[in-house]
Amino acid sequence: MANDSVVLRFSDVTFEYEHGKPLLDEASFSVRSGSRVTLMGQNGAGKSTIFKMITGELQPTSGSVFRSPSDATVAIARQVMPGGARDLTVREFFASAFPDVKYNLDKLIQDVFDVVHLALPLEKIVKTLSGGQQARLLLAHALIQNPDLLLLDEPTNNLDQYGIDHLTGFLMTYEKTVLVISHDADFLNAFSDGVLYLDAHTKKVEQYTGDYNDVIAEIQARMERENLQNARMQRQIQEKRSQAEVFAHKGGKLRSVAKRMRGAAEEAEENLVEVRREDKTIRPFTIPAQQFDRHFHGKVVEIKSVTVVRHHQPVEKELDVVVRKNMHVLVAGPNGIGKSTLLNKIVLNQSAHVVIPPEVIVGYYQQDFGNLDGEQTAFDALKEVMKEFDEHELRSTAAGFLLTGPLLASKIQSLSEGQKGLLSFCRLVLLRPGLLILDEPTNHINFRHLPVLAEALDQYEGAMIMVSHIPDFVAKIRIDTVVDLEE
């Protein structure tokens, strides 16, 4: 439970990566000790930037960030594994959490593994782990530090439902302060007692009490009140201006009345309130499917075997799956069993056990965006997938995914994880694939966009193979076959 002491305070904080284009503009908020607070806002609004200012990785352009006490410890569970950690062993990764050598490190690791429900050999190389195992590892790396302020950046990404439930239960009993960035409404509603909403339009942080549902209802009610107030004021303004015109034409002493009327109208205009704007949602879209010639036999991909991980050892299992045009396949199974490994084998098409005809165009949504070049601009990343370059088509399509001029000119490494996700979907639209491979396509994506994405995937007329741990999302998409690796 939160108490009266404040552990974190932002006072009139402005931050900008580029001069004159602030992400935050004199934002102020406070977080009480022991509270569990959600940090919300649309993709690219600056949520992860706020976390970096809390850890000290970034400094405000102006204003102040206070932690109380000043030596309060902070640990962050990031969205994706840092590049420098991927070649470490699990033991070396946890050793990096401490400034000094911990002689009881192995015991500390095993204790925190019990919390995040993870079992791994400590000599395992981090990059060989599945996305779900890495997500648990990132969380455990933060928890092992026993911080006063725990920052979780999209902690449910890549977790299966059991993992999400386990994390939720832990956070509900965690006695220290937690700040969470997440787009998973059910997860947030289970334990949050407050919300900080980063408004991408005003660059301010709005503070609310209650869970996600409470905040959405309060914001909607506030918008309705502001719209009603403005409608009344607009009517008064129009009436006074009309009266002023009538009196002005009558001349004499009535001209002074007309002047007062115009003054009253101007005063009423000053009383108009700025209505809080909703976050933008991407436009409905279609992923065009590759058109094959009449000689194509219809088999887009054949999968003859799969590598399944049992007790940390790979086991090859026979599989007889044929995916044809307009067929949607869901690959299921718990974290670490080999789902992403299977998708990678299909994409690479370098295994004798996976057969894809050479004419098939493969579109791949990779969960960690490892198939994107961080040094490339977003514009060039879109241009390279187009069979025939058409700048108008590129920019028009990108705008539908909220990727406008400045973002298109930016290097991919400077985009938020959510913006990278939208860029990946935009690439799929321009690519026109015959086979769509989707590895956790909801990761990092704002909840407002998910119904639009689900509808596009449901209507996709090519072959599709998908991995997703979000049942509500999958339920909106036509699935013809489920390949459960656990079976």
Image (cartoon, rainbow, N blue to C red):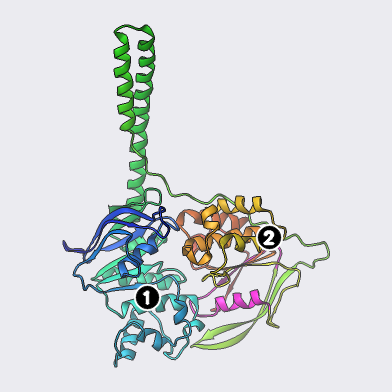
Q: Position of residue 176 (x, y in %)?
A: 24, 70
**Would you name the residue on which mark 2 appears?**
386
Tell me where residue 296 sits by quadrant. bottom right
| Quadrant placement of the C terminus | bottom right
Q: Amino acid at mark 2?
A: Met
Q: Which mark is residue 139?
A: 1
Q: Position of residue 343 (x, y in %)?
A: 60, 74
Mark 2 or mark 1: which comes first in sequence? Answer: 1
User: Could you tell whether 420 is left or right of 262 in the image?
Assistant: right
Q: Which mark is residue 365?
A: none
The structure residue drawn at horizontal position 50% and vertical position 82%, both measured from the top left corner, is 127
The residue range painted magenta reads 324-349
Query: What secondary structure is marked by label 1?
Result: helix
The structure residue drawn at horizontal position 16% and vertical position 61%, both measured from the top left corner, is 4
Q: Which residue appears farthest toward the bottom when viewing the image?
A: 103
> 283 above or below 8?
above
Within 10 Å of disc 1 (Cα), the crowding (few <14, some 14-19, many 20+) is many
Tell me where residue 255 sits by quadrant. top left
Q: Amino acid at mark 1?
A: Leu
| Quadrant placement of the N terminus | bottom left
Measure the alpha-carbon separation of dots 2 and 1.
38 Å
Q: Which residue appears farthest toward the right when viewing the image?
A: 295
The structure residue drawn at horizontal position 43% and vertical position 75%, both measured from the top left corner, is 135
Query: What secondary structure is marked by label 2?
Result: loop
